[in-house]
Image: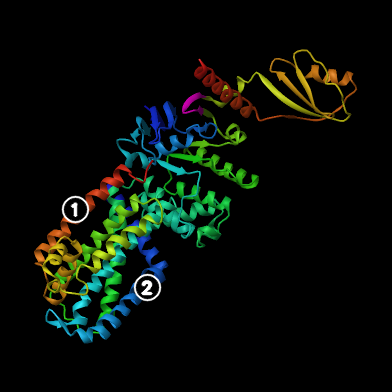
Amino acid sequence: MQKMALEITDLIKTYANGVEALKGVSLSVEKGDFFALLGPNGAGKSTMIGIISSLVNTTSGEVKVFGDSVQKNRSNAMRHLGLVPQEHNFNQFETPLDIVVNQAGYYGLTRPLALERAEKYLRQLQLWDKHDKPSRQLSGGMKRRLMIARAMVHEPELLILDEPTAGVDIEIRREMWEFIKGINEAGTTVILTTHYLEEAEQLCRNIAIINHGKLVENTDVKSLLASLDMETFLLDLREPMSVPPSVEGISTRLLDSTQLEAIIPKERSLNNLFSALDQAGVRVLSMRNKTNRLEELFMRMINDDNQDKTEGSAA
Amino acid sequence: MSVKLNWIGYKTLVRKEIKRIVRIWGQTIVPPAITMTLYFIIFGNLIGKRIGQMDGVDYMTFIVPGLVMMSVITNSYGNMVSSFFGAKFGRHIEELLVSPLPSYVIVAGYVSGAMTRGLIVGFVVSLIAMQFTHIAVHNILITVSIAILTSILFALAGMVNAIFAEKFDDIAIIPTFILTPLTYLGGVFYSISLLPEFWQKVSAFNPIFYIINGFRYGMLGQSDVSIGTAYVIILAFIGLLGGLCLWLVHTGKGLRS
């Protein structure tokens, strides 16, 4: 039987100050998956990653990484895992080479192999020309790539990236995507948390959304996107309009005299809208999705969940 | 298999710690050497000449074991507390906490690093002492073993301090208000026989008193306490603090949320 990369069972975490960060989350991630863990700030994502990587103790529940329990057999579980945390957590006075080689040593790699692997990953992540400079001299994007090289040096079966592209420019972000995609294609299971939902939509096959310490959704990205029943488009108009066109089944409003917002149900055709605009003598210069599709779903789920919480507490 | 992997992890951690000591040698090796040189010049040479003899040896020779031990104690403790708390404060302790290394390897690695600095500084201070007085070591085995055990003991004490510390002030309080007074009152500069009977009894509760006298026995062949008692006290404290450190790192107190 194929082992799951990650199995989380009834995970509860209550901090000493009484904050309930996780309220009984169960989740599994298949071997080889590219998995997105999403949720608003404070939803419990970082606590969950902290528990998986043994940086946070559980209140109850169990986490298994490739069948090894983090709570009962921590050392074996950690051998399968590589972590790229949200915050920089390396010694800023050490060089990138030392940081990566030392991490390899903690995983039992001999020094010659550690040096070989460190060079391989520092080169792949375009950091080799800085390998002997103090890491405090690296730019923000370089520091993030250094943490990826460090996490990859023991070639883990499961790589967890906690907002790896936060604050990096689009060019570096796309390079990082390519690198991570390559790692996943080579067989490493990847779990990603991100606030860039475009990133999750483009990279991930499966997704879990957590809010207020509970699992709101856990499905594959395709099914989730298929469940989207409305899309919002923005149309740039050549001629100004004073009244938005009235089209049956489509909600329209003018954001300004040359920008029209249209909320269109999935079963409706866009042709109706264009016909109405054509009749009004208005020509469309360009059209785009107002938000990323996953972002639209994400916001809806989080809002629904928050509304349920409010109603529940009011009752 | 895991023994071999843990051994590689231990060596990596020790190498990293030694590299740190060497990288900042201006902070780790030079200042204690300068301080001790001043002690030898002022207390040993200038004031010591007027004091004459203490317990049958000239005063300069008498203070050498105490000053060497003082260097070993403060540098083992200081290295551990600054390195471990620095790693905690800068969050790079997480590199170790997410790794498969068991708690005992993490404790052993940091203790070995702190021991290295304590013993290097102790050796440097001994070399400086030789410029001021002739020292014929009475028993090399006792001298070296007491120095090693002392460095282990104070490295462990430094780790407990670093684990509980939440800010930089917390790592300065213990050395300033506990360690330094106990070291000075542990007989570095005087024989206990000079004290009134009451203060002699109070000194018996100071563990550093036994350490300094144990080392003095190894170097000079004379001591205010029996060498057996010194070993028992040092080993008992190593057992106590070692067990505490292992428990703290294993359970993640002050390290894991």
Residue drawn at x 58%, y 24% is A303
- Whichever of callouts 2 and 1 sits on the residue coming sooner in the sequence is 2
| Chain of the residue that carries numbered disc 1 in the rendered image | B
Q: Which mark is residue B31?
A: 2
Q: Residues within 10 Å of mark 2 (few under 14, many from 20)?
A: few
* Residue sitting nearer the eye, B172 or A85: B172
Q: Which mark is residue A232?
A: none
Circle 1: residue type: Gly
Q: CA distance from mark 2 to mark 1?
A: 31 Å
The range drawn in magenta is A209-218
Judged left or right of residue A186, residue A57 is left
Q: Position of residue A177 (x, y in %)?
A: 58, 41
* Residue sitting nearer the eye, B36 or A148: B36
Disc 2 or disc 1, which is closer to the eye?
2
Q: Position of residue B10 (x, y in %)?
A: 31, 55
Q: Is residue B223 visible?
A: yes
Q: What is the residue that sits farthest to the right in this orientation?
A: A281
Residue for badge 1: B239
Q: Position of residue A93 (x, y in %)?
A: 47, 60
Above or below B194: residue B206: above
Residue drawn at x 75%, y 13% is A249
The kind of secondary structure element at disc 1 is: helix
Circle 2: residue type: Pro
